[in-house]
Image (cartoon, grey):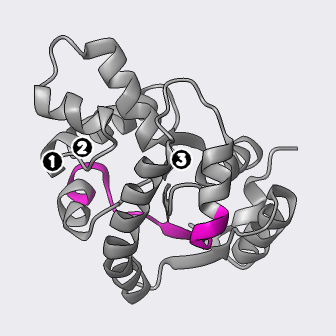
């Protein structure tokens, strides 16, 4: 089972995906964290273009991104983790077809919708080691998101697998909204809530 989660920087993807994974038996893959870990472990042998893209939080070439995500998903499957949330993918429509060929099509896509002002406030307030969350970086990433996300939303809405969640609230309220959104979902032949960890 495969879930994609999209949303602006600061929209609550990391926080809510971690909670969803913990309580509903998924493995959470943050694209950003995965790329940073690859750079940390394999920096000496990676292509310089990939290193620069990760360092500057820019979009990777599609083949490079797909290869890394495929490696991570297959690694998880080998260890028995077949149900995965990929947080932060896709960020561009032209990533979709090729990467889906490599890792599979999603069963569901969650769009965490949060106004720019709230997302910016959250992102600039956090201080996470290894993260580059300065204001100018946020503005660049948000502009990119605003320009590219509409096509992604339209594609998955066309497939009828997109669910939009208002994540402008504090975490407990946004979490409740996410659960309400998922209330009627059936993944496979079971309700989403049958997955809950007791």
Labelled pair 1, 3 in contact (Cβ < 8 Å): no
Q: Residues within 10 Å of mark 2 (few under 14, many from 20)?
A: some
Counting from the top left corner in percent of width and height, residue 136 is at 42, 50
Residue at (85%, 66%) from the top-left corner?
Answer: 173
Counting from the top left corner in percent of width and height, residue 24 is at 72, 50
Give SS at disc 3.
Answer: loop
Residue at (86%, 58%) from the top-left corner?
Answer: 172
Give the Cα separation between the discs numbered 1 and 3.
Answer: 26 Å
Reading the image, the residue beneath label 2 is 65
Whether residue 11 can be seen here = no
The residue at the far front in this view is: 136
Residue at (17%, 40%) from the top-left corner?
Answer: 64
Give SS at disc 1.
Answer: loop
Vertical placement of residue 20 versus 70, above or below: below
Reading the image, the residue beneath label 3 is 83
Q: Which residues are magenta?
A: 100-118
> Does 153 lie within the magenta span?
no
Residue at (59%, 54%) from the top-left corner?
Answer: 13
Which quadrant would residue 149 be assigned to in this image?
bottom left
Q: Nearer the viewer, residue 192 or 61?
A: 61
Q: Which mark is residue 145?
A: none
Sequence-earlier tag: 2 or 3: 2
Counting from the top left corner in percent of width and height, residue 198 is at 88, 44
């Amino acid at each position: 089972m495969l879930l994609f989660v999209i949303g602006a920087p600061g929209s609550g993807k990391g926080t809510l995906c971690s909670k969803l994974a913990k309580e509903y038996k998924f493995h959470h893959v943050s694209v950003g964290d995965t790329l940073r870990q690859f750079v940390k472990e394999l920096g000496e042998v990676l292509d310089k273009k990939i290193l620069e893209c990760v360092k500057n939080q820019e979009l990777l070439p599609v083949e490079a991104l797909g290869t890394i995500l495929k490696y991570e998903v297959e690694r998880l499957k080998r260890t028995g983790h077949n149900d995965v949330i990929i947080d932060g993918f896709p960020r561009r429509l032209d990533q979709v077809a090729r990467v889906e060929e490599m890792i599979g099509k999603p069963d569901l896509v969650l769009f965490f919708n949060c106004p720019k002002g709230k997302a910016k406030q959250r992102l600039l307030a956090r201080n996470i080691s290894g993260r580059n969350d300065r204001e100018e970086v946020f503005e660049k990433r948000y502009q990119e998101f605003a320009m590219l996300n509409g096509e992604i939303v339209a594609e998955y809405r066309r497939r009828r697998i997109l669910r939009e969640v208002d994540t402008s609230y504090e975490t407990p309220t946004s979490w409740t909204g996410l659960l309400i959104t998922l209330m009627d979902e059936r993944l496979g032949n079971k309700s989403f809530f049958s997955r809950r960890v007791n």
